[in-house]
Image (tube, rainbow, N blue to C red):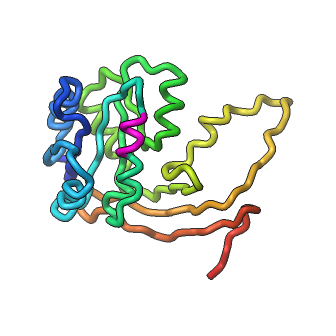
């Protein structure tokens, strides 16, 4: 069964990006394209209502994080809220934390089969998704991964509040992305009303 979405792949001139292109085709993506510019991705989103952005992990994540920042700053909701997936071979904890901080929606360990990738892709669609926006982050709520878990009987972590926004939206293969609502919270964590 075809995935009615476009896989836009970062770094198409590298062998690892070509590997991601082949994997995306095997998984059933309707089409694949290289990630050249934000404007080209926005044009593609007018024809294919749901785009996935696929990147292969590199030790210097800054160029990829910059590309994700471009996506999240787009005025097109089909790009701003598009799923961004990182593929990593034998990831270390620090690599996973780096990917989380960069704002990836999913981190897939290589090697991965086409059927497993299709399942992971479909998990990004058809249900409400929540993103958080702070002064230096825009993406899925991953605080639990960054802070670690409190051990039973251990010290409680203080809840730190800061001004932020919560975006609720749904991604659908054929219909694209629909924003359900946006909530704005003040620096005390209190929901602001219009």
Task: Give the percent coordinates (x, y) of residue 29.
Answer: 18, 44
**Viewer-nearest residue: 164 or 3:** 164
Q: Main secondary structure of the magenta part?
A: helix
Residue 164 sits above or below residue 53 on the image? below
Residue at point 38% right, 48% down? Answer: 124
Task: Give the percent coordinates (x, y) of residue 46.
Answer: 19, 64
Q: Is residue 82 located in the magenta-colored stretch of the structure?
A: no
Residue at point 62% right, 82% down? Answer: 194
**Viewer-nearest residue: 68 or 122:** 68
Left or right of residue 173: residue 59: right
Residue at point 60% right, 35% down? Answer: 145
Q: How many numbered circles are shown?
A: 0
Task: Give the percent coordinates (x, y) of residue 168.
Answer: 49, 63
Residue 92 sits above or below residue 20 on the image? above
Residue at point 47% right, 40% down? Answer: 102
- The single residue placed furthest to the bottom in the displayed view is 194
Left or right of residue 134: residue 114: left
Task: Give the percent coordinates (x, y) of residue 169.
Answer: 44, 63
Quadrant the N terminus occupies: top left
Is any atom of residue 1 visible in this view?
no
Residue 172 sits above or below residue 24 on the image? below
Q: Quadrant of residue 164?
A: bottom right
Q: Quadrant of residue 110?
A: top left
Left or right of residue 177: residue 22: left
Magenta residues, start to end: 62-67
Is any atom of residue 46 visible in this view?
yes
């Amino acid at each position: 069964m075809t995935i009615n979405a476009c896989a836009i792949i970062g770094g198409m001139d590298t062998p690892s990006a070509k590997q991601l292109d082949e994997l995306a085709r095997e998984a059933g993506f309707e089409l694949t394209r290289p990630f050249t510019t934000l404007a080209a991705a926005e044009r593609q989103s007018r024809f294919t209502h749901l785009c996935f952005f696929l990147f292969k992990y590199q030790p210097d994540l800054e160029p990829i994080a910059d590309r994700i920042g471009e996506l999240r700053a787009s005025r097109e909701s089909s790009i701003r809220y598009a799923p961004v997936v990182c593929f990593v071979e034998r990831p270390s904890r620090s690599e996973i934390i780096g990917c989380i901080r960069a704002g990836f929606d999913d981190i897939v360990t290589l090697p991965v089969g086409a059927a497993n990738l299709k399942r992971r892709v479909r998990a990004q669609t058809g249900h409400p998704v929540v993103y958080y926006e702070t002064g230096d982050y825009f993406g899925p709520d991953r605080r639990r991964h960054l802070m670690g878990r409190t051990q039973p009987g251990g010290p409680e972590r203080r809840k730190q509040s800061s001004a932020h926004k919560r975006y609720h939206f749904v991604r659908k293969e054929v219909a694209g992305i629909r924003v359900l609502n946006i909530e704005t919270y003040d620096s005390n964590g209190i929901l602001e009303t219009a």
